[in-house]
Amino acid sequence: MEIVGRGFVARNLEPIAGSHPGTVVFAAGVSSGSNASMEDFAREATMLYEVVERCRARRRRLVYLSTASKGMYGTHGPPGRERGPVFPSTPYARHKLAMEAVLRDSGLDHLVLRLTHLVGPHQRPHQFPPALVRQILSGTVYIHRGVCRDLIDIADVVMCLDRLLALGVRREVVNVGSGVAIPVQTVVAHLEERLGMVADKRLVEVRDEGRHDISIAKLTELVPEVKLCGFGPGYYAGVFEKYLPGYVAEARRGTADARAGAR
């Protein structure tokens, strides 16, 4: 399996890189819409077009990592499902849906995974879990009021992709997440308890936020093994238990480096 990209997801896919010959996973480009520009989206699109052409020439199957965020499915109505129309509300989600259409119309054997918020090793400091831990340790944490996140262990994502590829699933869009969106305030309270400290909480008002779950019925039907992952309201706590020591070590190392640089 060829992995395009060198970031967080790409590095976590390395354990299965020796499997699934004839498959290319596009794990590059824009990973979050929060700070992305139109130039960033254009660069990803250009890169994807090149990979599509290469896959067509070599008859490769292509996997694209899309988003199951509230920007794709909205914050109202039933859990977001893969079948049927969606009406993205953010530039990032609109870009991802457009890239899905490129694959759908390319004639390639392909698989699209709509991912929720990933948790695991090798994340960048600005991404959700590491940034949240760093803020709590600093004594002040900023919380967007009403924001919820469906958090999933990157190891479970890799397992799901491995099984989908082994089963030969193609020309499908599949939601991959825990199926339960957790309020960020709940996550903060859990982390404070585990870290043994209470941070000063600054609530930030945001528009059009709220809880919205996604449906993982299709994923569960295709990959019954997800029933063993423990998805549910308490799943996120076990994921943080697994990775929290690493986040704390990274945060403290970053603080020490910043102090050393200021001398």
Image (tube, grey):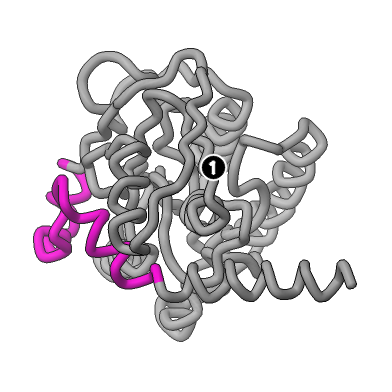
The percent coordinates of residue 220 (x first, y second) are 15, 51
Q: Is residue 156 left or right of residue 220?
A: right
Name the residue nearer the viewer: 66 or 52: 66
Q: Is residue 20 above or below residue 24?
A: below
Name the residue nearer the viewer: 50 or 214: 214
Is residue 22 visible in the rendered structure shown here?
no
What's the residue at 29%, 57% (across, down)?
193
Q: Choose top left, top right, bottom left or bottom right for residue 228.
A: bottom left
What's the residue at 51%, 31% (across, down)?
202
Q: Is residue 164 left or right of residue 4?
A: left
What's the residue at 48%, 27% (across, down)?
203
Name the residue nearer the viewer: 33 or 146: 146
The percent coordinates of residue 109 (x first, y second) are 45, 53
Please, what is the three-letter code of the amino acid marked with disc 1?
Answer: Leu
Callout 1: SS? helix
- Please, what is the dominant secondary structure of the magenta stretch? helix
Which residues, given as a range, are shown in magenta? 217-244
Is residue 92 visible in the rendered structure shown here?
yes
Name the residue nearer the viewer: 115 or 131: 131
**Residue for badge 1:** 103
The percent coordinates of residue 40 (x first, y second) are 76, 41
Q: Choose top left, top right, bottom left or bottom right for residue 80.
A: top left
Judge the density around disc 1: few (<14), some (14-19), many (≥20) Cα neighbours within 10 Å. many
Q: Is residue 158 above or below residue 83?
A: below
Q: Is residue 225 magenta?
A: yes
Q: Is residue 178 above or below residue 146?
A: below
Quick one: quadrant of the C terminus?
bottom right
Q: Is residue 63 magenta?
A: no
The percent coordinates of residue 230 (x first, y second) are 13, 60
